[in-house]
Image (cartoon, rainbow, N blue to C red):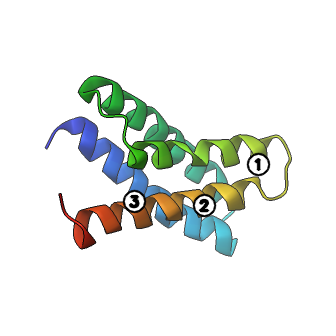
Amino acid sequence: MGWDVIIHSAAGILSLILGGLMMLDLTPWARDAFSIMMIITFVSAILISWWTSSWVRGHFLAMAPILGIALGYMGVSFGFDLAFGLLCLAFAHFVYRGFVRPN
């Protein structure tokens, strides 16, 4: 497994954890940490897709939460909720593709 995949996977899992902290409003820094991890996930999804020429649905789902983050920082009240929801959708897709319906 390459470092790109390890970075992408670790950032995605950390995003889920930090997103949960953000949604529960347990820590004041969780929103910014979630946003940073999602940016890393976004960039790594683009790089992996580009390097492997595999623009698959899962990579687009991994990139989608960046829209919610942008909306959140622009002041839209549901932006970060949207980002976390899209991340959960991407993770559910990953679990479905990886464990329920293997290639």
Residue sitting at x 70%, y 62%? 81
Image quarter of the C terminus: bottom left
Disc 2 secondary structure class: helix
Give the foreground label among 2 and 3: 2
Q: Is residue 29 visible?
A: no
- Which numbered circle lies on residue 60? none
Q: x, y (%) of residue 53?
A: 29, 27
SS class of the residue under badge 1?
A: helix
Tell me residue 100's x, y (percent): 26, 73
**Residue drawn at point x = 46 percent, y = 39 percent:** 40
Kindly identify which residue carries mark 1.
72
Lower position in the chain sequence, tag 3 or tag 1: 3
Secondary element under disc 3, as helix, strand or loop, is helix
Q: Which residue is mark 3?
A: 13
Q: How many marks?
A: 3
> Quarter of the image holding residue 14?
bottom left
Q: CA distance from mark 1 to mark 2?
A: 11 Å
Q: Which mark sits nearer the N-terminus, 2 or 3?
A: 3
Determine which of the numbered discs, if any, sits on residue 84 in the image: 2
Query: Is residue 81 left or right of 56 when viewed as pictured?
Result: right
- Image position, residue 86 (x, y; %): 58, 57
